[in-house]
Amino acid sequence: MELKNKINFLEGYTGKTTIISIDSKQGEKLYFFAPSKMATFRINTLFTKEPSTISWLNRLKETDTFLDIGANIGIYSVYAAVVKKCRVVSIEPESQNFSNLVRNIVINNLYEKTLPFCLAMSNENKIGVLHLSTFSIDGAASGHMFDEELKFNLTPGKSPFQQGCIGMKLDSFIEEKYFPIPDFIKIDVDGLEHKVIEGAITTLKNPKVKSVLIEIYSKLEEHMNIIDLLLSLGFEYDSNQVEQDRIKEGWNKGMGNIIFNRGM
């Protein structure tokens, strides 16, 4: 049957029920569902794409809670739960990513360790629209924007597909008591990190939050303001780590993770 769709939703889709096994390097096996080329890429580059993220996750203790905001298909959530055996809460708003995230939780038997939520973290509680950068079956795509039709650099962009979505402030989410104040927080939402921070001030003031890893785009004033805010809340960062992780060339030049620590 020939389909005449404006959206190539089969792009990158392999249609194969493939599960990839990865050696954690610490004795455990990690298992991931890989139905697309992008999902396979994310899985196979777990230890090479962002090595500082793995080093950061290795600081987790079994008694910690790790909050993964922008979990995508859950490669870091699964790593933290399997290797560090800590409590994990995964936040991912896009439908195809969330579906694969849940599968990865299931195939690693993390029912009691990991709790996934299909919603967007933002600076207000509202029902809105998630503007997708692309739509493909199990595509493991990124760059989706909640309530604003923008590109990663916060300039206007055109989305091929919109998905209804619930947005919440982290502070409000914590108040619902589904999980305790997180010890470690990862924030990677491809542009709207500043809104996540705006909705998380009360949480970030809590001394229980030991460390925050956040993707910062140095060309955005909104992102650079995050640094000053977190410093004012008692966090510190290593300038050598920032420089090492900053991307030096390509379309995302100037982007990189900054690891903020408090009392460590």
Image (cartoon, grey):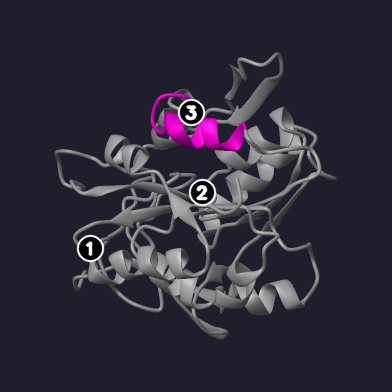
- The residue type indicated by label 1 comes to Asn
Q: Residue at x 46, y 65 (%)?
A: 230
Select label 2 or label 3 by which is in front. Answer: 3
Q: Is residue 33 above or below residue 181?
A: above
Ranked by sequence position, the earlier of labels 2 and 3 is 3
Residue with the mark numbered 2: 72
Q: Residue at x 63, y 35 (%)?
A: 59
Q: Position of residue 130 (x, y in %)?
A: 44, 71
* Residue 144 magenta: no
Separation of marks 3 and 1 at Cα, in angstroms: 25 Å
The span shown in magenta is 47-58
Q: Position of residue 114 (x, y in %)?
A: 75, 47
Few, some or many residues within 10 Å of mark 2 (<14, 14–19, 20+) = many
Number of labels in the image equals 3
**Residue that extends furthest to the right in the rendered view of this protein:** 112
Q: Position of residue 242 (x, y in %)?
A: 33, 43
Q: Where the C terminus falls, by quadrant?
A: top right
Separation of marks 1 and 2 at Cα, in angstroms: 19 Å
Residue with the mark numbered 3: 46
Q: Is residue 25 above or below residue 166?
A: above
Q: Is residue 101 visible?
A: yes
Secondary structure beneath disc 1? loop
Horizontal relation, residue 86 to residue 19: left or right: right
Q: Position of residue 51 (x, y in %)?
A: 44, 29
Q: Where the N terminus falls, by quadrant?
A: top left
- The residue type indicated by label 2 comes to Asn
